[in-house]
Amino acid sequence: MLLAGGVGSRLNVLAKLRAKPAVPFGGIFRIIDFTLSNIMNSGLDHVGILTQYKPFSLMKHIGTGAPWDLVGRKRGAKILPPKTGEQDSDWYQGTADAIAQNLDFIYRDAPENVLVLSGDHIYYMDYRSIIDFHEQARADLTIAVREVPIETAHHFGIAITDDMNRIVSWEEKPRRPRSNLASMGIYVFNTRFLIQALEKREGHDFGKNIIPDSIHADKVLAYRFKGYWQDVGTLQSFWDANMDILNPDSELRLRDWKCRANIEEEGMVGDRPPSYIGASARVKNSIISPYCTIEGEVYHSILSPGVKICKGAVVRDSVIMHDCVIEEGSLLDHVIADKDVTIGASCLIGTGEINCSNRQFPDHLASGLTVIGKNCAIPPGTTIERNCIINAGTSASQFPSKFLKCGSAI
């Protein structure tokens, strides 16, 4: 069961028009592609994909499930939207409630165990390893955990374990965590235990309700994962994970992970010609997707299909998504630009010192990035300093001036 209905509020404008798992990543991928590819590479046959928040682009991307070999007489990927009615309660109220509303999908196959996954993390895992660990230990519930820096542990569900990897205490996003073992949002449930836990639950969430209610009376174990894993739930972590692709010392290795994308999706790769690199262009340590036109300079950046970098334009340490146009003489440094953004000529984007956080969203952006939403047009000659956010759909006429100082938002 793949939970893919997240809002992704900390991704700000990147998740304003789409579900978090549908956010583009690494050039030709979306975030959910990593979990779907893990499912494929683990030899699993049936997956229910639970959608909710602005699911259209996500559903379109998944299609029949064929890109991940999830189609056939005995294989399948089924979209499971909430059974919406007139009441708010008809929507999924949390992760546990989402599974509870779709128990009929589980009953159909009568499995011994149910694997519950999240669609918003970047990692590679063969799920057979955690399933084997769970079965050999005869656990009721096994939770994949990974060590994280203690200063970031407050963003996660945190497990406290004994010497036998049994979870003896659980803290959901604690202010002062007692451990750095963070939940990866990967659960293996004994099916009978899952059904009983859902029937007697007093809340709607695994982390807040099911797990804390289970650890003392039932056998709940921690499965320690050692590989690369990144929760790309913030703008900074999203940028970091993209940059990890370009770092040869990083454990994020797309080729080795055998990650697949839906390249036949409209506007992706299947219907685009090769890229063109002009004689005057310079490209170093970057990913250039199909149908890009590069006549300027690109350094340590990731370009999705259809990006155009004009003569004299320079892009550094940036993530530029589909069909963006960077016109002549513009400079982009530490920028995330969503799809169909046009940067006018002679713009300076991401300049100046980091001397403030974003004034409207201080918890979302303080590290020096500049983030531009989908379908924006930046007027020629504009200077935008660091930690600025430009909302999706902002036109050139909506800019209050041609200088936005650090921490501004439109």
Image (cartoon, rainbow, N blue to C red):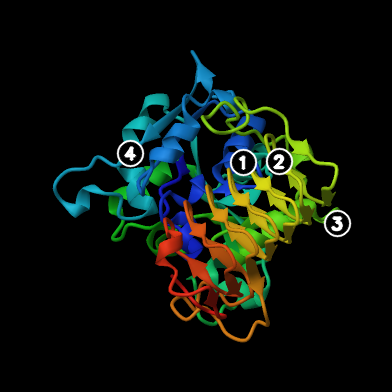
**Would you identify the image quadrant in which residue 164 lies?**
bottom right
Given the image, on which type of amino acid does mark 3 rest? Asp
The residue mark sitting in front, 1 or 4, is 1
Can see residue 215? no
The residue mark sitting in front, 1 or 2, is 2
User: What's the distance in space between the residues labelled 4 and 2, CA to CA?
Assistant: 39 Å
Q: Relative to 22, does residue 201 appear above or below in the rendering?
A: below
User: What's the distance in space between the residues labelled 1 and 4, CA to CA?
Assistant: 23 Å
Q: Relative to 270, does residue 59 appear above or below in the rendering?
A: below
Can see residue 292? yes
* Mark toward the start of the polypeptide (3 vs 4): 4
Q: Relative to 404, does residue 238 appear above or below in the rendering?
A: above
* Mark toward the start of the polypeptide (4 vs 2): 4
Residue in front for this viewpoint, 106 or 110: 106
194 to the left or right of 201: right
- Residue 26: give x, y in percent of width and height: 66, 47
Given the image, on which type of amino acid does mark 2 rest? Thr
- Residue 137: give x, y in percent of width and height: 62, 46
- Residue 352: give x, y in percent of width and height: 67, 80
* Mark toward the start of the polypeptide (3 vs 2): 3
**Numbered disc 2: secondary structure:** strand
The residue mark sitting in front, 3 or 2, is 2
Mark sitting on residue 161: none
6 to the left or right of 231: left
Mark sitting on residue 249: 3
Residue indicated by mark 4: 81
User: What's the distance in space between the residues labelled 3 and 2, CA to CA?
Assistant: 29 Å
Residue indicated by mark 2: 293
Residue indicated by mark 1: 29
- For the C terminus, which image quadrant? bottom left
